[in-house]
């Protein structure tokens, strides 16, 4: 993004942006201190990493007891924090650095700051209320609108995301700038939902006031619980996201507790990684062991702090609120 | 021609889109935290100037366009074609009216220009940002017209017509901004 030059020692963020960042970090810490949520600090380097097909972690080698050992820079502190929860930590939060390879753009830097927190005893709806409180505390936004994923797609993409088949989703995608004829041989429903979501739905979310989008398709559960369908309503993942001004700011789950189900999802991901010829890391056995031991029922959410600062500062690009983006790192 | 993966996309990169050469104006990386990454790209069609938007799955490859911008010297026009030469090797090229676009209003023989070649054929010509052209015809400014910002049309030696201040007379040489087609100042002698 930025050319290498004699000036590239300078920060891309102005001092105002950096001051705003410091104020927001202080507000976040005060918010959780007041609510009795414990700040924790978990490793950036871990022996295993996420299996998620759409997340690439960065691997590195360092000696452990004299032997070169592969570690992964964490794409989020989720697994380590769940191990703390299983060990009885109670409500916890963390302001962590996270690293995701190959993500760079107006809203992305490969290394970024993430706020992640967990609330034992909460479901996703209770945590959505707390996310709303935090947005109000930091940004002074009006209270958030609650909108189900299904209603959002019906409204903006004119399809039922839980029931439409690939052909129907593909047809709806003709209204987007995605080249359906040239590149549209995908048979994965979720691929088409992502096309429609990013092109037709997201730009309308969080306009005027924040939007909390909830009840995702079960196929996009990631680490959320799935609520079985009943009485004609489809099975959904108890997952939510926060949008402000069309920007995705946070992603939360009513957390999956079942270790066996978790192992199955990891293995499904790894199978898909194999098919797509993506790197496969080891499954996090320590997380699975913690789930076997017992994770208290809880909800958790991760929020992009850089984007929060962008919104607070009225910035157009993440570079305006981080001191040194990857090209100047 | 080579293909380019979305992670090589940057503004100025030339791609073949629906059989036409296009240039990337803006490349936006779009990625949900949990989900497929996309590149949303704004491109200018280099043949007709239209701006289009395309979205690609990140990692997808798109065929590059064999488009090169080459500095050349304008030689002359025979009325149908405009002739240019590469000063380094004396290679000559001819551009048709469509490729010339607005550039034909501003060029004098020997002017340096940038010619965009697609498969070695000129598809557009970019004149210098500023040109100096003599006024061929303009009406005298009305005496006593003191309204600031008053202007009148003037025909230049290339037959281009620009708005100029009332005090400009025939035979004067003017500095023109070719990007806006506007008068800037009198040229310094």
Image: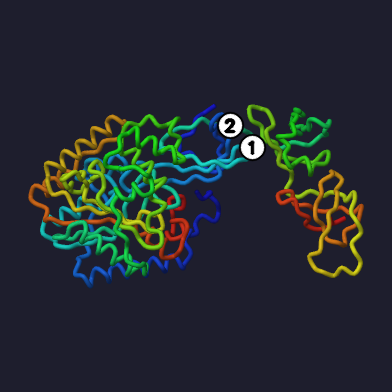
Q: Is residue A277 above or below residue A258?
A: above
Q: Residue furthest left?
A: A293
Circle 2 crowding by C-alpha within 10 Å: few under 14, some 14–19, many from 20: few
Circle 1 sits in a helix, a strand or a loop, which is it?
A: loop
In this view of the protein, can residue B40 be seen by the observer?
Answer: yes
Q: Which residue carries the number 2 mark? A: B20
N-term-proximal mark, 1 vs 2: 2
Answer yes or no: do the residues labelled 1 and 2 have beta carbons within 8 Å?
yes
Chain label for disc 2: B
Residue A304 x/y as whole percent: 34, 57
Chain label for disc 1: B
Residue A75 x/y as whole percent: 29, 48
- Determine whether, in the image, residue A91 is placed left or right of residue B55: left
Circle 2 sits in a helix, a strand or a loop, which is it?
A: strand
Q: CA distance from mark 1 to mark 2?
A: 9 Å
Look at 9% across and 51% down and name the residue there: A294
Residue placed most toward the observer, B38 or A32 = B38
Residue A22 x/y as whole percent: 37, 68
Circle 1 crowding by C-alpha within 10 Å: few under 14, some 14–19, many from 20: some
Look at 53% across and 46% down and name the residue there: B26
Residue A284 x/y as whole percent: 18, 43
In this view of the protein, can residue A70 be seen by the observer?
Answer: no
Residue placed most toward the observer, B114 or B94 = B94
Determine which quarter of the picture holds residue B83: top right
- Determine whether, in the image, residue B96 is placed left or right of residue B54: right
Does label 2 lie on the same chain as label 1? yes
Determine which quarter of the picture holds residue A208: bottom left
Q: Is residue A293 above or below residue A320?
A: above
Q: Which mark is residue A316?
A: none
Q: Is residue B49 above or below residue A80?
A: above
Q: Which residue carries the number 1 mark? A: B48
Determine which quarter of the picture holds residue B94: top right
């Amino acid at each position: 993004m930025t050319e290498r030059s004699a000036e590239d020692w300078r920060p891309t963020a102005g001092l105002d942006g950096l001051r705003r960042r410091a104020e927001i970090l202080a507000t976040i810490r005060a918010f959780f201190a007041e609510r009795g949520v414990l700040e924790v600090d978990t490793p950036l380097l871990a022996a295993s990493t996420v299996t998620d097909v759409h997340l690439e972690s960065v691997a590195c080698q360092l000696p452990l007891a004299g032997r070169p050992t592969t570690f992964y820079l964490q794409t989020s502190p989720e697994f380590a924090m769940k191990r703390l929860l299983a060990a009885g930590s109670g409500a916890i939060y963390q302001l962590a650095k996270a690293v995701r390879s190959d993500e760079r753009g107006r809203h992305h830097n490969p290394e970024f700051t993430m706020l992640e927190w967990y609330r034992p005893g909460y479901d996703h709806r209770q945590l959505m209320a707390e996310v709303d409180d935090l947005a109000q505390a930091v940004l002074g936004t009006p209270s958030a609108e609650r909108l189900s994923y299904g209603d959002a797609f019906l409204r903006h993409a004119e399809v039922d995301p839980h029931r439409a088949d690939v052909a129907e989703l593909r047809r709806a995608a003709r209204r987007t700038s995605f080249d359906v004829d040239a590149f549209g041989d995908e048979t994965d429903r979720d691929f088409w939902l992502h096309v429609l979501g990013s092109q037709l739905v997201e730009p309308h979310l969080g306009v005027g006031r924040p939007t909390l989008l909830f009840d995702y398709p079960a196929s996009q559960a990631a680490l959320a619980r799935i609520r079985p369908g009943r009485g004609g309503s489809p099975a959904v993942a108890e997952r939510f996201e926060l949008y402000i001004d069309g920007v995705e700011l946070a992603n939360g789950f009513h957390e999956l507790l079942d270790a066996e189900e978790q192992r199955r999802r990891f293995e499904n991901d790894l199978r898909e990684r194999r098919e797509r010829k993506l790197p496969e890391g080891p499954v996090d056995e320590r997380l699975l062991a913690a789930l076997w031991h017992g994770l208290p029922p809880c909800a958790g959410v991760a929020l992009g702090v850089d984007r929060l600062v962008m919104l607070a500062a009225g910035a157009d690009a993440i570079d305006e609120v981080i001191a040194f983006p990857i090209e100047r790192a | 021609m080579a293909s380019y993966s979305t992670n090589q996309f940057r503004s100025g990169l030339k791609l073949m889109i629906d059989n036409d050469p296009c240039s990337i104006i803006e490349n936006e990386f779009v990625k949900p935290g949990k989900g497929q990454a996309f590149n949303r790209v704004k491109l200018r069609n280099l043949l007709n100037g239209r701006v289009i938007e395309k979205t690609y799955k990140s990692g997808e490859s798109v065929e590059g366009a064999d488009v090169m911008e080459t500095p050349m010297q304008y030689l002359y026009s025979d009325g149908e074609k405009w002739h240019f030469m590469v000063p380094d090797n004396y290679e000559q090229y001819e551009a048709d009216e469509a490729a010339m676009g607005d550039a034909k209003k501003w060029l004098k023989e020997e002017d340096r220009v940038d010619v965009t070649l697609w498969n070695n054929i000129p598809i557009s010509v970019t004149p210098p940002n500023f040109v100096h052209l003599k006024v061929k015809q303009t009406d005298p400014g009305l005496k006593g017209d003191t309204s600031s910002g008053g202007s009148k049309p003037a025909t230049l030696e290339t037959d281009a017509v620009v708005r100029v201040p009332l005090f400009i007379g025939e035979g004067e040489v003017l500095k023109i901004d070719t990007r806006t087609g506007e008068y800037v100042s009198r040229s310094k002698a």
